[in-house]
Amino acid sequence: MVKTAFLGPRGSFTEAAARTLVPDDELIPYKTIPDSMDAVKEGTVTRAVVPMENAIEGSVNITLDYFIHHQRLNMGGEVTAPIEQHLLVAGGQMEQLEEIETIYSHPQAIAQCHQFLREQYPKAEIQYMNSTAEAAKYIAENPDEKAAAIANVVAAEAYGLSFAAKSINDYTNNQTRFLLLTNEDQVFSEEDLGDTPYKTTMMIGLSSDFSGALHQVLAAFAWRKINLTKIESRPTKTGLGNYFFIVDVDKKYDDVLLPAACEELRALGCEVQVLGSYPCFTWDAIKKNGKPKSIKEVI
């Protein structure tokens, strides 16, 4: 059986994404995102599912930076999931929810519930954990502590926690992109893909910082009518003010348009790397073998 790593422990959003993308794989939890990516490179597992971007908080920088600077892998697929956060407590341990003194969760989850926490628990101490599931597990193992966790439904069920408050994320359109990373050339068969749309992710470094440089880069895509769904600058980590751009293109890497755009950019003196070209699923599009129709049936 193929082994796939995910950010654990059990009950994390990443596990739910992994179960949807590769339901037949054996899922192995890892303590951190870099650990799960390293496991693929080392051959301990074949694949890893990692969070890449959240609709509210933007890119998951630890994933993107570790991928760029340390552990390049093939991008095998993507799934975008609606995310719903809940405030969880050890059942029956606190008579009053106002007694909550500490709230544990992943930094992204804390940020997604910022307004709720300001209004409802302004004096509570915030403690960051490696994942929402780890926070839930901690609460379950420390029931006497006046504390709560921000996590999902699966974590609540896995660790026997009660709901202090449901759907506490500040925005209802909370979504996260999860990416499947692998050493395989292809994960999904043509039968699996059907008419699934593709995305191509590229890294572009400008030759020098001059007026109009970014405009020239964008023009290489614009006149070819190539749609960009995202453009983001990230530090090169070589010095203050040095950046490269991560660009998501709304199409599969082909034999004509994208190679020509890359060559034009290189002719301008830009460094261009294609990081991956991969299918982008929705929960409904990849349901089979009893897969849920909605993420809310999972998390």
Image (cartoon, helix red, strand yellow):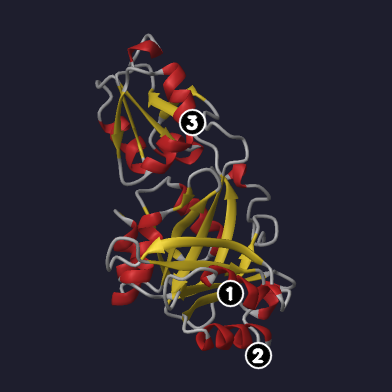
Measured in 3D between alpha carbons, the distance from the residue under mark 1 to the one under mark 2, in whole angstroms, is 22 Å
Q: Is residue 275 above or below residue 119?
A: below
Residue 154 position, x and y percent, is: 48, 40
Residue 216 - label: 1
Please tell me whether mark 2 sits on a helix, a strand or a loop: loop
Residue 195 position, x and y percent, is: 74, 72
Whichever of callouts 3 and 1 sits on the residue coming sooner in the sequence is 3
- Judged from this view, the residue extending furthest toward the front is 211
Frontmost of labels 1 and 2 is 1
Towards the viewer: 188 or 74: 74
Image quarter of the N terminus: bottom left
Towards the viewer: 227 or 145: 227
Please tell me whether mark 1 sits on a helix, a strand or a loop: helix
Residue 67 position, x and y percent, is: 37, 68
Q: Which residue is mark 2?
A: 255
Quadrant assignment, res 235: bottom left
Q: Are marks 2 and 3 in contact (CB under 8 Å)?
A: no
Q: Amino acid at mark 1?
A: Gln
Q: Are marks 1 and 2 in contact (CB under 8 Å)?
A: no
Frontmost of labels 2 and 3 is 2
Whichever of callouts 2 and 3 sits on the residue coming sooner in the sequence is 3
Q: Which residue is mark 3?
A: 86
Mark 1 Cα shell of 10 Å, populated few (<14), some (14-19), many (≥20): some
Measured in 3D between alpha carbons, the distance from the residue under mark 2 to the one under mark 3, in whole angstroms, is 46 Å
Q: Is residue 221 above or below residue 255?
A: above
Whichever of callouts 1 and 2 sits on the residue coming sooner in the sequence is 1
